[in-house]
Amino acid sequence: MLYAAAGICLIGVYASFSLAAHAARSEGRVQHGWAAIGIVSAGSTAWATHMIALLAYEPGLLSAFEPISLILSLLLAVAGLSLSMSLVIGRKSRSRRVCAGMIMGLSIAMLHYVGQSSYLVTGHIDWDIHYVAGSIGLSMPVFVAAMVVAGERNRYLRLAAPPLLVAAIAMLHVMGMTALQIVYDPLVTFPPFALAPEIVAPIVAIVALGLIALALLGLRFSITARAQAHRDRKRLFELANLAFEGLAICENGIVTSANDSLQRLTGYDQDDLTGEPIAKLIGDFDLAGMQDHREYDAEIAAKNGDALPVRLLCRTVSLGSKTLTVVALRDQSERLKSEATIRRLAYTDTLTGLTNRTHFNELLCARMLGGRAETEPFALLSIGVNRFKCVNDTHGHAIGDALLREVGQRISRCAREAEIVARFGDDDFALLQSGEQHNVEELAATIIESLLRPFTIDGHVIEIAPSIGIAFSHVEAASGEALCRNAVLARHKAKSQGDGKSCIFEAVMLLDVIAQRELELDLRRALKTDEFEVHYQPQANAETGLFEGAEALVRWRHPRRGLVSPASFIPIAEDIGLIGAIGEKVLRLACREASSWPSRCTLAVNLSAIQLSDPRLVDMVADTLFETGFEGHRLELEVTETALLRDDARSFENLRDLKRLGVKIALDDFGTGYSSLSHLRRFPFDRVKIDQSFVRSIPSDPESVAIVQAIVMLAEKLKMAVTIEGVEENAQHQFAVKEGCDQIQGYFLSRPVPQSDIRTLLTAAPKRAHQENGDRARPSAAFA
């Protein structure tokens, strides 16, 4: 019977642990159900072991069992085991497992001694207190040890838990039975509800059979779990091999398997990785501290010693009763190369390989921050290539691109010590240079000298001329943007001084720009508030002196500045696109005024280059003539050769349509353009106006005299009238009469006069003698 008790104990303990493991693999209510069955199985195991041992005990006297204590012993065991298991389920704390082991030991000790108290004999039972204390004291550490190792990660330690629990139960029972001493007493009788051993034995047998059944069930669960774990591992490995990322499956930080991608990535074989700590690959990364689904940048050590950049991810998964960590390693080599390429493209000018505007501005702003511009002053050089557009138009964009590459290389060679050399776009280059002012000026001179040397590209010899603006960080520059602005302003100033010049920024340049910006705003307002007015300069017959008409000249009466010269605002109006609207206003005002002049008098009005190429020009002129009632044959529109070059086809088409309206066309400033004879051949102008630059030196300058004589002769052959401008002296007047000029215009007749005076002049007697008119310099402007 003792062997039977030992066998039932072993079977019951195995069944209890198997059921507990199955409960750990389950979830929800199923987990709680199997946990309860396992607890009952454990309590029944201890109770059945104890009862079988009592039934096997032969004191030589009649025996029986008191049912209440018998049942109470079983309940105490189940309750104690339930309490101990509740402390450790779902928790990994060793201190909790120690407490659970102590509660389990005490509950089984109570089962034993309460169960022994239910044992009745015809005599008295005494206890040896030393054996009782020894049974509890010696078995308790073993119970604790069994519970502690049952929760360890190491599977070999966990295997020691069932034998330790069996040993603890056996130790408690053997010493407890040894403490039992019986003294025969024939007067002792059994109570009427006492249970004979023949009744208790079948109950114990049923419990034992139940434990055997549970053990078999637990065995089935274990076999099924192992098979499922094997299938899960195989499936997990198959899935891992399908992944592009390198995957390592780890248990307690040890690699249990690795997929093919990881082997290709690191160069290690499966045998090299299996059983090795994952730290062999990822170094000191703490897997336990890594969050699931979060990516980490890391470097791993390949077998050949290379450090590979990777993105590291980890995820904890449950496989059967085990908790595994899947570590994913994603190769970042190509991504980093792509990012480096994108960064290079984003920060580099693709044509020249120099730093581009975006990166230059970032570096410049970083240099300007923190007061470094004051403590470590530097200069920004803005370099422009003059006439680059002409190269593109003449030789094509391929040659233009090659030229820009050569320019970038020459600038880089000259500025080897420059902090940054950049191309902003088109022909706009820049560089940063530390050092004293004279060093920066020497660098600018070196760059100019280098760029002035001819370029030979695909057999073409190309010459360009640079302009360089220099701005120092400590002069009127609170930001990188302001410094760039200053350098560009200085470059524009240098360009205005001629090719191959450099200029250092001065604060007055910024004031000029601000003043010009204010003038632009005022100019837009002036158009809306009718601040423009028209002055007129009379034109007279060269021989008789009779006034034949006048040229309309625009003036701007500014509310604060007074009368603004056309030379100040006409170029601005052209830049900001207002010249067309101003020209239309001048034409309407002049035609309305001229409609009241004597019928013999004509009106001359200048057309700008923008107006001449405007498809609406002819309709605008026709509408103006209709609205003002001015006859078309009395209107003379003046165009310059420069205006004709802007849009040749459209310009000549507009001129032909204007001629159909009866309007006369005059070629103004003749002789100062690029292709005067070609224009005279292509279009039958009604009048040619000789520019005042030729008139100023006659009759004393033979060359000017020859040019004027040639123009007059040419016009006569082409049946065109001739007007000579800028006549200021009687000698010039007499020369015009002698050479056969048809009309004169200039200060010799009159300065430009306002609308209120022109009618008086046009009805006055012929002008035959010079009158002093003060300043003889005629205003130089597009509308003057």
Image: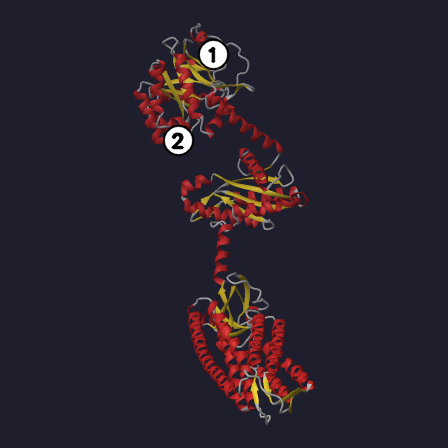
Please determine whether, in this image, residue 495 is positioned above or below residue 192.
above
- Most foreground residue, 275 or 385: 275
Instruction: Answer yes or no: is residue 710 visible.
Output: no
Residue, x 60% and y 45% (percent of image)? 443
Place of residue 338 in the rendered image (x, y in percent of width and height, measured from the top left): 48, 58
| Secondary structure type for disc 1 | loop
What is the C-alpha distance between the residues marked 1 and 2?
32 Å
Between 212 and 65, the one lying in front of the other is 65
Give coordinates of residue 133: x percent, y percent. 68, 83
Q: Is residue 450 visible?
A: yes
Q: From what the image shows, is residue 427 above or below residue 342?
A: above
Residue underneath mark 1: 749
Asked where in the image residue 116 lies, by quadrant, the reply is bottom right
Q: Residue at x 40, y 19 (%)?
A: 587
What amino acid is found at the position of numbered circle 1 in the picture?
Answer: Leu
Q: Which residue is mark 2?
A: 645
Residue drawn at x 35%, y 17% as measured from the top left: 625
Q: Is 719 left, or right, of 139 in this rendering? A: left
Seen in the picture, residue 239 relative to 199 is either above or below; the reply is above
